[in-house]
Amino acid sequence: MPNAPGKTVAVFDKKDKLRRFWPLAIILIGIIVLAALALGITQRMNQLRGAPGDNLTWTLSQVEVDVLVLMDESLLAAQSETKDVSEIRRRFDNLYSRTSTLRDAPVFAEMRRDSVFNEQLVTLERCLLKLTEIIDGTDANLVANLQPLISDLKRIREEAHAIALTGIGLRSQAADAERATLVRLLLAAAVISLATILFLGFVLFVIVRQYRLRHEASKAVVRANARLKSTFDVSLDAIVVANTDGTILEFNEAAETVFGYNAAEAVGQDMSEMIVPEHLRDAHIAGMERFNRTKEPHLVGKGRIEITALRKSGEEFPVEISIGMASDHRGTIFISYLRDITERVAAEENLKAARDEALAAEKAKSNFLAVMSHEMRTPLNGIFGTLELLGNSKITKKQRSYLDIAKRSGDILLHHVNDVLDISRMDAAKMELVEDSFDLSQFFSDVITANEATAKGQGNALKIDLKKMPKNAVLLDERRMRQVTYNLISNALKFTTDGIVTLRANTSIDHDGQSLLEFSVTDTGVGIRTEDQAHVFDRFYTQERSYDRFASGAGLGLAICKQLVDMMGGSISLQSQVGIGSTFTVTIPFKSDTSAKPVAQITEPKVDMSALKGKEILLVEDNEINRLIVHEMLKANGLIVHEAHNGQEAVDLANMRQYAAILMDISMPVMNGVDATEIIRANSGRNQKTVIIGLTAHALADEQARFLAAGMNTVLSKPISQSTLLGALLMAVQGDNLYQYSNGPTHTGQAIDQSTFSDLENLLKPAKLQKLLSDYQAEISALLVEIPHLIRENDMAALAEKTHKSIGSSGMIGAHQFQAVLRGLEQAAKSGNSDDAQYHANGVKAAWPDTQTELKAKFYT
C-alpha cells in the first residue's frame, strides 16, 4: 500500500531537514567561538605566568643601581691612594650595557613608543656618550677627571631614576590593560558558554519535542495506514495498484468480486493481461511506455472515465475508472479506482429509450393536436357555411333559435381549437414576441369600445380608469397585449351578470429605473373559491365542474395569459372572493418609444381661406365614400380636385401635372400610398418636393412613423374634419412645416358623432348624403357577410384589408365607436390570430345594429 497522505508525511520533507540543520550550525559556531576565547585566555595566562613585567621592572631599577654603584666606585677611587680605575670601567660597562638593553631589547619596544620614556632614554644615552671619552681614555686621564665624572654621574642618576619611574608606570598601565583584556575574555567566554548551555538546553527540548512529534506522527502514519488498508479492503469500488511496469501491487476485495481473481492470483501479474481487454492492450502498453519515457501521465487526474474492462471469465464489461498517481518506497505507483457500471449503463439505456418514447409521444401529441386543430377547421368551415346558407333561407322562428344555438356552439368550438393551437405553438417554442410601438391610452380605449356591445348584452357596465399614461408611444407586443387584455375582460364579462367590469391602468418606475405598466380587470361576478385560486392559471382547469356550468370554456384562456405575460417579463396575480368578485392584475415592464416625432395639433387657420382657392390638389383614395366626402370638402372651399383611385394612378398623374399638395391614402389596391410616396420622392419629377399629406385609419405611432419615413410631410388620421384638412392644406400652400399629429375622434358615448354628421349635412345635398349613407350601409352589410367566411378560411390578410377599408368610411360619417371596434378586428387580423379575430368579429356584429339604428334615426327623422 502507498504511504498515507496528509500532514504526517510533511514531517520528513526537505524543509524539515533544512530546519534541523540550523541548530547544529549554531552549536558549531558557538563551539568555535569558545575555542577561540579559550586560546586567547590561555595565551594571556601564559604571558602572566612568564612574569615579563617583573623582569622589565627589575631592569629599569637596575639602571639606577648601576649608576649608584659607578658613583661609589668613582668616590672610592678618588679617596684611594692606589687610584685603581679598572672597577670603574667595569661598572660603566655594566651601566652602558643596561642602557643598550633599554634601547634595543624587544620587551621595551612598547615603552619606547612613549614619547616621555624615549626622550629620557635619549638624554641618558647622550650623558653616557659624554662619559665614554673619559672612561675609554688613559688611567691618568680618568684619575684626573674623577671629580667631574662624579658630578656627571649625579646628574645621570637623576635621569636613570626618571627612566625607572616612567618605565615602571608604563608597565603598570600595560599590566592593568592585560588584566582588563583577560577579564573581558573570561566574561565573554562565560556569556557564550551560558548561551551555549541554554541553547543546548533549548535544542534538547526541541529534540525531545520533535521526538514526541515524530513518535506521534509515526503512530499517525501507522493509524493512517491501518485506516487506508481498511478502506482499501472494504471499498465498494475495485482498487488496483500497479507500478510503472504495469505489474499489479495491490488488489482489494472489491476488485476480487468485480474481476473474479483473488489477490494472490492478481498481485505480481501484468495488469494488461489480467483486466485489460485484448483490443485495448496495445493502447494501454503504449501509454505506459510513453509515461516511462516522458513522465507525463495521460489519464491521471482526468476524473472518472468510462472504459471497458475484462473479467477472469473473459467477459468484457463497462467500468468507470479514476486514476491517481503517488510515490512510496516502491517508486511511482498508479492507483486505479474502478466501478462496475453494467447495471447503470443498462438503466441509462432504459431511460434513454423511455425518454425517446416520451418525446415521441409528446411530439405525436403535439402533432396530433396541431393536425386535428387544423383538420377540424375544414368541417367547421363546412358547418359554418351551411349554417349561413340556412340562415339566409326561409325558416321558422324555432328553427332560427336552433340555428343560433348551432352558431354559438360552433364559435365555442372554434375558440377551443384556436386555444389548442396557441398552446401547441408555445410548447414548440415557436411563439415569439414582436415589439410594436403604440399608444397605451388609445389601446385601452379601443379595448373598452370593442367590448361594450358584449357587456351591454349581459346587462353589465364596462368602465375604464386610466392614470399616468405615458405621453409617448410604448414598445410592447401589441398583439399579445390585446390577447391578454381581451381574455381577462372576456372572462370577467362571462362570469358577471348585471354588474360592473372595470379596467384600471397605471404606469410607474421601479427602484431600478424600469418603467412598469400595471393594469387590472375587476368584476362583481361570482368570484373564485379559495381552493381554486391556486389552479386558475393551469391548463384545462375550470372552476365549475358540474354539467350545468355557469359559462363555457376549456380552461386554456388564463393559462395562455399567464404564459404570454411571463414571456413579456411580467407577472399576473389574482384576488377573489366568492359572491363579491375577482381582480386580475398584470404587471409588465415596457420601454418608451423616443424615436417618434413631437406632436403638434393643427388648429383653425387665422388667415383668409381664400389662399386655397384655385389650387390644384391630387386626392388619392380608393374608397368611394371617403373620396366623395373629401372631394366635396375641398370643392366647397374653391380647390380644384384631381382624383386617383390607387397609388399607381397617383404616380402617373404626379409625373404629368404640378399640384399644390397631394392627399395620399395608405391602403389601396395595385399600389399602396407608402410605395407611391417613395416613388414620387425618388423621381425627379414635377412633384418631387410637393407636400404629401397622408390619410389613414392606421392610428398606431409606429405605423405613422413609417409613413413619415417614406416621405410624407404629415399624417392625418381618419375621420378627418374639414377644418383640420383645410388647415393642413393651407400650411402646405404657405410653405409652413408640418408635423405628425393625432387628430383621432373624440368618443362622445353616441354611436354617431353629431359634430361629424352635421358637417356632412352641411357639406352634401340630401340626395347625395342619402346615397352616401346607403352605400355605407351596403358596404358594412357586405363586410359582415364576408367576415365569418374569411375567419373560417383563416384568410387574415384579406380580412385586415377589407376591414381597413370600412374603418375610414366609418370615421368619415361619424361612426367612431363602430370604427374603434373595426380597428380592433383589423389589428387582430394583422396579428394572424384567428381566435382574436373571431372575438372582435363578434364585437363588430354586436355593435353594428346600434350604429345602424342611430344612423337611420339621424337621417330619416
Image (spheres, helix red, strand yellow):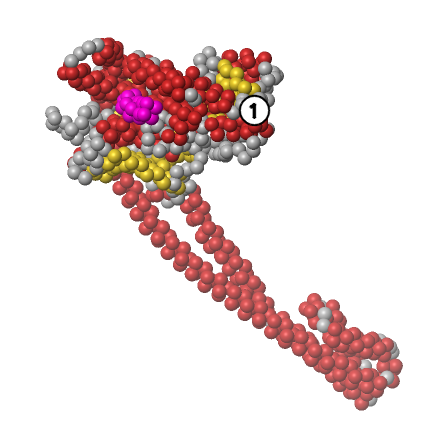
Q: Is residue 376 left or right of residue 436?
A: left
Name the quadrant containing residue 391. Answer: top left
- The residue at the point 75 percent across, 70 percent down is 103
- The residue at the point 52 percent across, 62 percent down is 38
**Residue neighbourhood size for the residue with mark 1, other residues' Cα within 10 Å, grouped as few (<14), some (14–19), many (≥20):** some
- The residue at the point 14 percent across, 16 percent down is 398
The C terminus - image quarter: top left
| Span highlighted in magenta in the image | 841-861
Q: Is residue 59 left or right of residue 272?
A: right
Secondary structure under tag 1 reads loop
Amino acid type at mark 1: Lys
Measured as percent of width and height from the top left, residue 729 is found at 53, 26
Name the quadrant containing residue 435. Answer: top left
Residue that mark 1 sits on = 613
Residue 546 magenta-highlighted: no
Q: What secondary structure predominates along the stretch shown in magenta?
A: helix
Q: Farthest residue in the left direction?
A: 547
